[in-house]
Image (cartoon, rainbow, N blue to C red):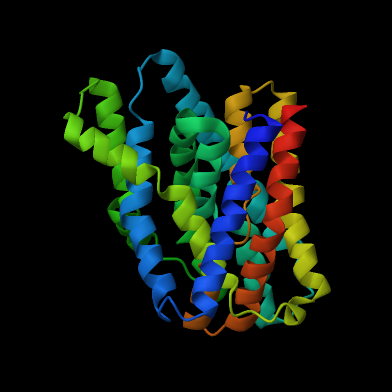
Amino acid sequence: MASFTELLNLEGLMFLCAVCGIVMKRRKILPDNAREVLTDLVMNLILPASIIHSFEMEFNMTVLKKFAVILIIAAAAQVISMICANLFWNRQPKNLKAVFQYGTQVSNAGFLGLPVTEGVLGAEGLMYASVFLIPQRIVMWTAGIAYFTSSADWKGTFKKLAKNPCIIAVYIGFFLMLTQFQLPVMIENTLVKLAACTTPLTSILIGIMVADVDYRSLISPMMFVLVFVRQLLLPGLVFLGCALLHIDPLLTGVSVLLVGMPVGSTAPILAAKYGGDYIFAGKCVILSTVLSLFTIPLWCLIMSI
């Protein structure tokens, strides 16, 4: 786990990069489609490069056992999230209920969680985080969509999963680790430099997301309840379970950080596509992302005690 000073520096870096995104968006330095373009860049190039690089380590049975443990924790976390999603929001209007359920079930771990995990726990933490996300990606495109449509396309889900650049990066990473194949220096240096862009670019994207928001319109008690469930209750349950079972501290840190990420940025996209309240969903994403600047360091401090 990173020291308090390292964590403070990481949060400072993310905050300043987010400010850069806000300023450039508000001053029209960046075009209106900058968010979509940078998102594609991060998800299709920068994050896959980081994942491949993180798998370049010595392989042994201890690592294999940790992969099995992290997958079990990830699956258990999804089950807990699904139970909470189906219990907590039954009194909400139908168009808002789907947003609350999806926000409880799906975090922004794939976009924000990976760079944060790498910054706090290093390359080894990023490797386990990449594996941890596999169950969430499956649930996101099945149960997640079912919240909005009452149906789930399992066949389509596995096609999307197989073609996802980050999942492909996991395949490549596994191959490199199992075979201990050494990449040419030129390719290795390219991966290292691309991976170094992950945190700054994701932070700039967060700034772009929140640049045009009227923060007064975010005030809604139920949004704060969602943030509590998403970023405090769920990671708290995972942390407690890992502590009781004496799970390896690194795997505990990866699990708690990823489960405690803000509401998934795909929430307003799916809400708009399937007739949900996409404006409300967007506000939930922004509020939870802003508050994650406080909840993420809180969990890091708790786990470092």
Identify the image quadrant of the N terminus. top right
Residue 259 locus on image (x, y percent): 62, 46
Identify the image quadrant of the C terminus. top right
Vertical arrangement, residue 280 with respect to residue 168, above or below: below
Vertical arrangement, residue 254 with respect to residue 231, above or below: above
Residue 178 seen from this side: yes
For residue 154, side relative to residue 186 (left or right):
right
From the viewer's side, name the closer residue of 265 and 241: 265
Residue 173 locus on image (x, y percent): 30, 34
Q: Residue at x 70, y 33 (%)?
A: 4
Residue 55 locus on image (x, y percent): 36, 30
Vertical arrangement, residue 186 with respect to residue 94, above or below: above
From the viewer's side, name the closer residue of 86 and 232: 232
Vertical arrangement, residue 259 with respect to residue 187, above or below: below
For residue 231, side relative to residue 15 (left or right):
right
Q: Residue at x 54, y 34 (%)?
A: 72
Instruction: Name the image quarter holding residue 104.
Output: bottom right
